[in-house]
Image: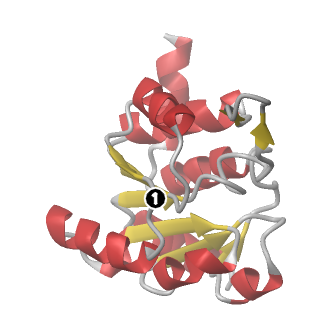
Amino acid sequence: MDKKALMEKASHVKLAVFDVDGVLTDGKLILGESGNEYKSFHVRDGHGLVMLLESGCNIAVITARSSKIVAERMESLGIKYVYQGEKDKGARLMKLIEELGLAREQIAYVGDDVIDLPAMTKVGLAIAVADARPEVKEHANWVTEDQGGQGAVREVCEFIMKAQGKFDERIKAYLS
């Protein structure tokens, strides 16, 4: 899909939905001896989410795994739509769309693995991170340049803000 068509799709986004492992993180799970789970989040991805929220776009996270770390990180970023332990991401997404009264064309979904396909195929703007599985890239409208956990989320957030004419406004807020 060409950039103009992607920008048009992104201009309508009112809800951006992100997977966690492989999108907000690099997909690696670090497990400690006592069973503690550790994840690494990129600070610039987090700030991109904050900027996107401040621009007026809602954000949701839908993940198949459950982790206290994810709940804490999303709370610290101000993300209120956090769904963990969701094996059927498409069904969870459809419930959220209905709850928020949005059309599919107003939703962007960012994923990396086949478990994301049921959600990705139900939105107006389907996005795969650069290191996503080939089957996921095949169903994406756009593939980021950056990998999951390495700036892909920031890339998506800035793209949506630019498509909606809100990026320069967010940058100016830091200059005043």
Q: Secondary structure at mark 1?
A: loop
Residue 36 % position (x, y): 67, 31
Name the residue nearer the viewer: 116 or 8. Answer: 116
Q: Is residue 169 visible?
A: no
Q: Is residue 120 above or below residue 138?
A: above
User: Quarter of the image holding residue 105?
Assistant: bottom left
Name the residue nearer the viewer: 50 or 119. Answer: 119
User: Quarter of the image holding residue 128?
Assistant: bottom right
Q: Is residue 155 left or right of residue 9?
A: right
Q: Is residue 15 left or right of residue 72?
A: left
The N terminus lies in quadrant: bottom right
The structure's colour scheme is secondary structure
- Residue occupying the point 79% across, 49% down: 26
Residue 167 % position (x, y): 52, 41
Q: Is residue 136 above or below residue 76?
A: below
Residue 130 % position (x, y): 81, 65
For label 1, the residue is: 85
Q: Is residue 174 left or right of residue 53?
A: right
- Residue occupying the point 58% across, 30% down: 47
Within 10 Å of the Cα at label 1, are there few (<14), some (14-19), or many (20+) other Cα atoms? few
- Residue occupying the point 46% across, 59% down: 85
Name the residue nearer the viewer: 23 or 101. Answer: 23
Q: Is residue 100 visible?
A: yes
Q: Is residue 163 above or below residue 157?
A: below
Q: Amino acid at mark 1?
A: Gly
Q: Is residue 80 left or right of residue 8?
A: left
